[in-house]
Image: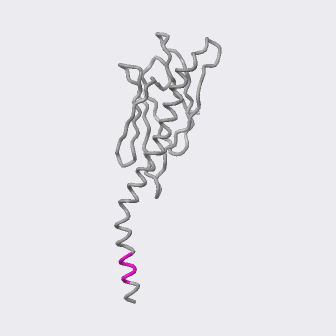
Amino acid sequence: MNRYVVAAVLTVALAALAAPAIERGATMNTNRQVETGIASIDDAATDLVATEEPSPDGHPNPRRVVELTLPRRSLTTVAVDHVRIVPRADRRATVVRYALADGRVRETIIDERIVGGDPDDTEPFVVRERGENRLALTLRTDADGKPVVVASRL
């Protein structure tokens, strides 16, 4: 009987000690997954602007399709609340912020301007759906004739 009590106490103690490490590992895994998706967006947007030209009216514009995974809460991942892609009005860059469900926020910069919807607008593009999200990045021109990447969901 005493062996069972000692075994139970040790199991609870080990679980309590391991919980912070498991949580940290889940956060690191989530950051890796989301940042891999953001890097795909960065690579596709940069490639579009560097290697393509917007098409004339009546023709489809060049585009790239990328996947962005927003993990759900599990033993190995922390839930992501949203990813917000915000074009910078003062320069040709974009700030990408993602928020974990616990409120922690991380951000990175993409060196191309990415907007959601209208190429002349500065509307952010927000992804909230957890799981696999397929995004289309389309090269268009703004009112000044400058190339801009427009993000949309597929």
Q: How is the image coloured?
A: one colour
Looking at the picture, tell me which residue is in the foreground, 65 or 46: 46
Which quadrant of the view contains residue 11?
A: bottom left
**Residue 124 location, x and y as percent?**
43, 28
Which quadrant of the view contains residue 3?
A: bottom left
> From what the image shows, is residue 17 above or below residue 149?
below
Looking at the picture, tell me which residue is in the foreground, 146 or 50: 50
**Residue 111 location, x and y as percent?**
43, 25
> Residue shown at 59%/25% (left/top)?
63
**Residue 89 location, x and y as percent?**
37, 20
**Residue 100 location, x and y as percent?**
39, 45
- Whether residue 100 sits left or right of residue 37 in the image: it is left
Write down the region rendered in magenta: 5-10
> Residue shown at 43%/40% (left/top)?
82
Look at the image and say whether residue 8 sits in the magenta stretch: yes
In this view, which residue lies farthest toward the top?
A: 144
> From what the image shows, is residue 63 above or below residue 24?
above
Determine the main secondary structure of the stretch shown in magenta: helix
> Residue shown at 46%/52% (left/top)?
77
Task: Quadrant for the N terminus, please.
Answer: bottom left
> Residue shown at 61%/11% (left/top)?
56
Look at the image and say whether residue 22 sits in the magenta stretch: no
Task: Quadrant for the C terminus, please.
Answer: top right
